[in-house]
Amino acid sequence: MISLILHVIFSSSFGIFLKYAKDRGHCLDSIGFINYLVALLIAIWSMMQLDSLSFSGLATGLGVTNGITYAFGFFLWKATVQVSGVVVTTAILRLSMVIPITFAILIWHEIPSAWQILGIFLTCSALPLLSTNDPVEVTPSNISTTSGLGAILISLTFVNAGVGRLVMKIFNETCPVDEKPFYLFFLFGVTTFFFAIVCIYQKIIPIRWEYVFGILVGVSNFFQSVTFLVALDSIDVLIVFPVSAAGSVLFTTLVGVVVLKEKLRTKSIIGIILAVIALIFVNLKNT
């Protein structure tokens, strides 16, 4: 459970640093490149600590696939926010946990208790409410979220995020523990490559503070991935994904209130109450 708690903290830090940088007008593409480059360098260092540098083709394929979902997800996030707004986009990203949870039930036969089913339902109810307190205010364009483009972007965002989480579960089920550094190497190698191309094409040169934010985000990004994989080693998916989704949004909201002195909206307060109850329920088993 310690690994899952650390994942929530690192995952929240990742989002908080990005929001803070965006609020101050920094270029997210350059920060994204530095972020993934830092995570890649840490992954390489982790590989060098191993006695053997052998790895399977499956770990390579899953790492590359997850890297594609990471890179594609970043650009999808920016596009969906412009069309549908932050509230809808954030909620969709978090609710995508239903994809790996569904596969866990159907493929790996992780049967939820009655309490866990209720907890998952409450989590899905709480996430849209918590998303309404997102401090990054981006006004959607005049394209309706129900229009063709809006619906396509929302669907792609949901599926891409869900598949990315599912790939991590597949890696955890099929590959040895000592292949984690190689998996992360390919994951962050692919994302670094994509962002390098974007920065070169757009002729983006990071400024000093973008290096700082990129390093902070990169460290958070690497360790949120590591702790998530470690959590999957010992905790059921039916607990990991709801706690990860609700816990990170809840932690980010509380940091915004306590540290950044943001005011909670009524919907967010209801969302916090539901999230706390949900976190209790998903950790209960039938007796």
Image (cartoon, grey):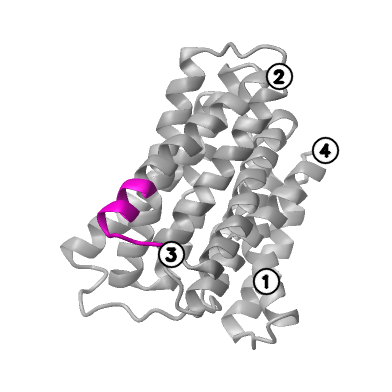
Marker disc for residue 50: 2
Secondary structure at badge 2 equals loop
Q: What is the C-alpha distance between the residues marked 3 and 1?
A: 29 Å
Q: Is-magenta flag for residue 196? A: yes
Secondary structure at badge 1 equals helix
Q: Earlier in the sequence, mark 4 or mark 1?
A: 1
Q: Give coordinates of residue 94: x percent, y percent.
A: 51, 56
Instruction: Compare residues 161 and 225 and report the one nearer the observer.
Output: 225
Whether residue 119 is visible to the viewer of this picture, yes or no, is no
Q: Earlier in the sequence, mark 4 or mark 3?
A: 3
Q: What is the C-alpha distance between the residues marked 2 and 1?
A: 42 Å
Q: Give coordinates of residue 237: x percent, y percent.
A: 63, 37
* Quadrant of the snapshot with the N terminus: top right
Whether residue 215 is visible to the viewer of this picture, yes or no, is yes
Secondary structure at badge 3 equals helix
Q: What is the C-alpha distance between the residues marked 4 and 3?
A: 48 Å
Marker disc for residue 272: 1
Marker disc for residue 28: 3
Instruction: Give the residue type that dot 2 points to.
Output: Leu
Instruction: Compare residues 13 and 46 and report the one nearer the observer.
Output: 46
Marker disc for residue 287: 4
Q: Is-magenta flag for residue 78? A: no
Secondary structure at badge 4 equals loop
Identify the magenta region: 195-205
Instruction: Compare residues 263 and 219 and report the one nearer the observer.
Output: 219
User: How many C-alpha atoms fall within 10 Å of the one at disc 2: few (<14), some, or many (≥20)?
Assistant: few
Q: What is the C-alpha distance between the residues marked 4 and 2?
A: 42 Å
Instruction: Give the residue type that dot 1 points to.
Output: Ile
Q: Earlier in the sequence, mark 3 or mark 2?
A: 3
Q: Give coordinates of residue 93: x percent, y percent.
A: 46, 56
- The residue mark sitting in front, 2 or 1, is 2
